[in-house]
Amino acid sequence: IEKALDKASGGTGEDFQPALYEGIAPGGAMVLISALTDNANRTFGEIRGVFSKCKAKLGTQGSVSHMFDHRAMFVFAGDDEEAALEALMMADVDVSDIECEDGMITVLVPPTEFFKTKTALQEMNPDIDFEVEEITYLPTMEHPIAGDDVEQFERFAGLINDLEDVQEI
């Protein structure tokens, strides 16, 4: 009873853990679902339930993650990717990819290089305004979904997004 009262009054902090679930969604698309949970069993059960309802397949660890690149991504306005690349190389950042398209520069680096990359870009341009600055999973190839699978996939994505612990699909 005392533990329940402490938890309700905020006396003890909740212990949230990150979790990554993998599977094949309707239409054959491979998905990674990132969650932050204080009860891994509850979250797993909820996600498994959505996969079952939508006739999708929940996979084991590593079953689809090999089809995604774990990267830190920065997107900002600019058109001089050479200057950005030079600033990153001077800061000894391991750049995976950099490209300029429609006045926006996209920089991809390993997740461990996030802070070093952000610092180098801010030193290059103190007024830099990042459109995107995140660590994410990027698919290595696209999988088109067509026909009846589109509606099923949208239902699947909606049900997953409705789960409280899910952070990103």
Image: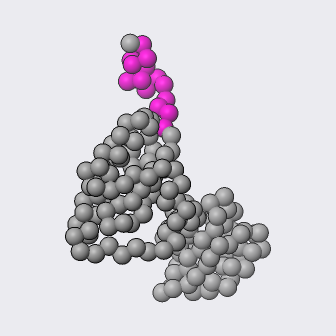
Q: Residue furthest top?
A: 1
Camera-side residue of 5 and 150: 150
Image location (x, y in percent) of residue 132: 50, 68
Seen at 33% across and 43% down, the residue is 46
Image location (x, y in percent) of residue 139: 49, 69
Magenta stretch: residue 5 in it?
yes
Relative vertical location of residue 109 with respect to residue 78 in this rendering, above or below: above
In the image, 100: left or right of 151?
right
Camera-side residue of 138 and 21: 21
Relative vertical location of residue 143 with respect to residue 24 in this rendering, above or below: below
Magenta stretch: residue 22 in it?
no
Seen at 27% across and 55% down, the residue is 54
Camera-side residue of 129 and 72: 72
Image location (x, y in percent) of residue 10: 43, 26
User: Which range of residues does the magenta coloring cover?
Assistant: 2-16
* Residue 123 in view: no
Image location (x, y in percent) of residue 128: 57, 72
